[in-house]
Image (cartoon, rainbow, N blue to C red):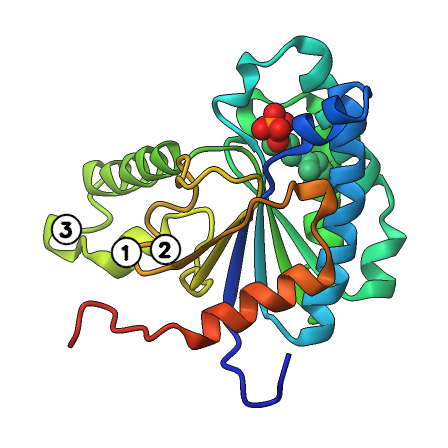
Amino acid sequence: MTQSQTLPDHVGIIMDGNGRWATARGLSRNRGHKRGAEVFGEIVRHAKRLGIPYLTVYAFSTENWNRPPQEVAGIMDLLRGYLRDADRYRKENVQTQIIGDKAQLDADLVEMIAKVEEGSRNNTGIHVNIALNYGGRDELVHAARKIAAMILEGSIPLQSVDHSMLERCLYTAGQPDVDLIIRTGGEQRVSNFLLWQGAYAEFVFTPTLWPDFTAADLDAALEEFSRRERRMGGI
Ligand code: FPP
C-alpha cells in the first residue's frame, strides 16, 4: 500500500475455497472453514489498520442450507465463537453487524447477534458486515415488502419511492456502496452477493483459496483497484 493509492470506502469479500483447501490436506471441510474464520479475523485487523471504513464478508448464503447438516452446524458454531468473544470488539474497536435474514437462525444465535450489534454500535475503527443467511435477491424482496407495507398503511405516497428510499430499506442502510468485491477460490461470478450495492463495483478475482489469503493479497487487490479507471456509467 502506498500513500497515493485510492482506498475503497467499502470492500466486499466472497471467501471461497475453504472446502478445497481442507480436502487437499486430507482434512474435513469444517477444518477449512475454521482456518477461514481465522483468516477473516486477520483480514479485519489489516483492513482496519489500512483505514478501510466498511468491510462485508460473505459467510453463509441463503443457498448454503443445502450443504450437509454437519457442515452448516460447523459454520454456525464458528460464528457463535466469534460473537461470543464480546471483549474483542471493545479492544479492537470493530463495529459488527450481521446482514441477512435472521428469521431462520437459531434463537441463541439471534440473541448473540443482537448483543454484539448493540455492544459494538459506537465503535469507530471499522464497520464489518457479516453476511449470514444472506442473498442479494432476498434482500431486495425484503426491501420491496417494507416499502409496500409503508404504502399500504398510507405512511408514504407511491411517488416517494426512489433509489434512496430503496437503499434505506436494505440491510446496509446508511452505508456506502461496495466499490471493490474480491472473490477468492478461482470462480468468477457474483453469486447473489450485494446485488444492489455492487452495481458499480470493481471485481478482483484470485485463484488463492480463502484459507491461504493473506494481508499481502489484500494489499495486491487494493493496488489493482486503485489502477482501475472508474467511470460509473460516464465517459
Ligand atoms: C466457501 O468455501 C465458504 C463458505 C461457504 C463459508 C465461509 C465461512 C467462513 C470463512 C467462516 C465464517 C466465520 C466467521 C467468523 C465470519 P467453500 O466451502 O464453498 O469452498 P469450496 O468451494 O472449496 O468447496
Q: Is residue 47 left or right of residue 86?
A: left
Q: Earlier in the sequence, mark 3 or mark 1?
A: 3
Residue marked by disc 1: 165
Mark in the foreground, 2 or 3: 2
Name the quadrant where ligand 1 sits. Answer: top right
Residue marked by disc 3: 157
Evaluate whether residue 137 shows in this view: yes
Mark 2 to mark 3 CA distance (whole Å): 16 Å
Residue 212 at x, y = what percent? 73, 46
* Element under disc 1: helix
> Given contact means CB atoms under 8 Å apart, are the residues at marks 1 and 2 in contact?
yes
Badge 1 amino acid? Met
Q: Earlier in the sequence, mark 2 or mark 3?
A: 3
* Element under disc 2: helix
Evaluate whether residue 9 shows in this view: no
User: Furthest residue to the bottom?
Assistant: 4
Of 149 and 12, which appears nearest the observer? 12
Residue 150 at x, y = what percent? 26, 42
Q: Is residue 136 left or right of residue 54?
A: left
